[in-house]
Amino acid sequence: MTAGDVGYNLPLTRLNPWYPGQMGVPGTDTETGLRQHCTGTIFYVDPNYPGASDARDGTNPTDPMLTVQAALNKCQGYRGDVVVVMANNNWEYDNSGNTTIGQNTIISEQVVMNTPGVRLIGVNQSGVTGVPWLNPASGGVCITVNACNCTVEGFAFFGHRATGLGVAIQPIYLFGTYGDNLTVRHCIFDEYFEYGILMQDAWSCDIHHNWFYATPIGIANDDTVATSIYDHIHHNYFRNCPGCAIYIGLGEHWNVYENHIWNDDAASGSAATDEGIEVAGGDYNFVHHNTMSCLLPGAGAGDYIDFNTGGTNDVWSQNTCANGTSDDIYSPVLVFPTMAAGATIVSAAVNWTLAAPAVIMPAVSAPAVPYLVQALVIESMSKNGEFEFVLYYGNANTEFARVRFSQLGGFFGYCVLQTPSVLIPAGARIYGALACSTGGGGAATATVSIIHRVVPGPPA
């Protein structure tokens, strides 16, 4: 659960400090510094510690730095550096009014992580809310990331502001710096942000085990810059995000799973259009095993279709709604032709020779979504014999099923032949061709129909 799972490794070695002492500033001449491993350094930030100063080297927890940005500025790329921010008493529902505790100074900065491979963590030793971080200005960004392979975890972001961002991945194209491979975990975002996490051209990020409480838009791909690809969004909790819990937009190849999305409107059957997961033009996303408070399709306002929008080539599977699993959606069995005579198919007048394919279901009558042909119904046959029937789909007459049957002893009609098929594209026509063992004695004429079923796809 959020910050309750944050951990950081104890230093393995104690080495000499990198920075010389500064006269008159306690802690700058400490004899030992702290490292996480043989190369990385831990920098401590604690504005509540007596005498905290950015003039220190920050490597000793009893001589911490004052600000997060000053600690980040000391980090070196891919050295394994960690910035540890200690707890304070200013979570909005915590003991902020109790000044006797002594941890009253909140983190209130807008910082930039521009050194790759740095881990920024908040350490709240006994709670799950994380280290409180106040957005200091309306419209501001608490943490801007434009370096790769960084981690942010263990903070409770809140702002009491009308706009602003918790964490933003914002590449600087002029300098060729990106925020790819970012991990954001064990954080909380409240309702006083426009976005909890905003991703601009962010590839292969891992965002998990965060809480979003009424954040207007929880996690979003910013399509106005460049789309984000190959991102993993999982095990997050969203409650009443009125804009959208997860906005994928034009994103591609996202893996979105095991998220829990509660929405009061969807749960009550009120309209909640695209307040769950929204794909707006993106493709090839895998959205699966999420739990949502909406109902299965059919309820209208607030149902699975209203609550979400998927991409054409997405895969949405095993998402659980309030009254069942999305893959269990009932799709009615259909027949074509319906309320009319079957289609006429004539064999060649030669033994075991297929005639040219003829139409069974024209494209204009085909389902507007992908579908399966489940059976071929032989309604009548003009003669005895053994027969082979081939089914085709699309303008190229692609074969997808072939069956054999016989009509002997004067029984000239009505048999149902199962035809397990590939997934037929939306709007594809169905043609058929017939061959007969006794075609040399005259062509056989059959009337046929098909039984088909549409396949539930991504929410439209």
Image: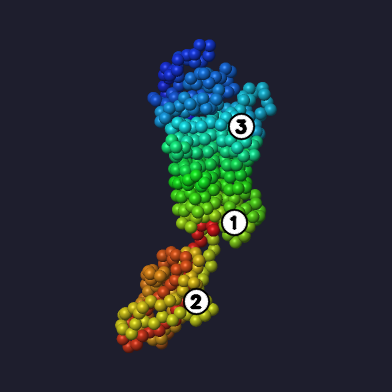
Q: Nearer the viewer, residue 441 or 127?
A: 441
| Furthest residue toward right | 97
Q: Is residue 321 visible?
A: no
User: In the image, what residue occupies the spot 55% across and 50% down?
Assistant: 277
Q: Which mark is residue 306?
A: 1
Q: Residues within 10 Å of mark 2 (few under 14, many from 20)?
A: some
Q: Quadrant of residue 440?
A: bottom left
- Quickly name the residue at label 3: 136
- Mark 1 and mark 3 in contact? Answer it, CB < 8 Å: no
> Secondary structure beneath disc 3?
loop
**Viewer-side label of 3, 2:** 3
Q: Quadrant of residue 398?
A: bottom left
State whether residue 281 is above or below residue 184.
below
> Secondary structure beneath disc 2?
loop
Q: Quadrant of residue 409?
A: bottom left
Looking at the image, tell me whether mark 1 or mark 2 is earlier in sequence order: 1
Q: Is 36 left or right of 66, judged from the image as shown?
A: left
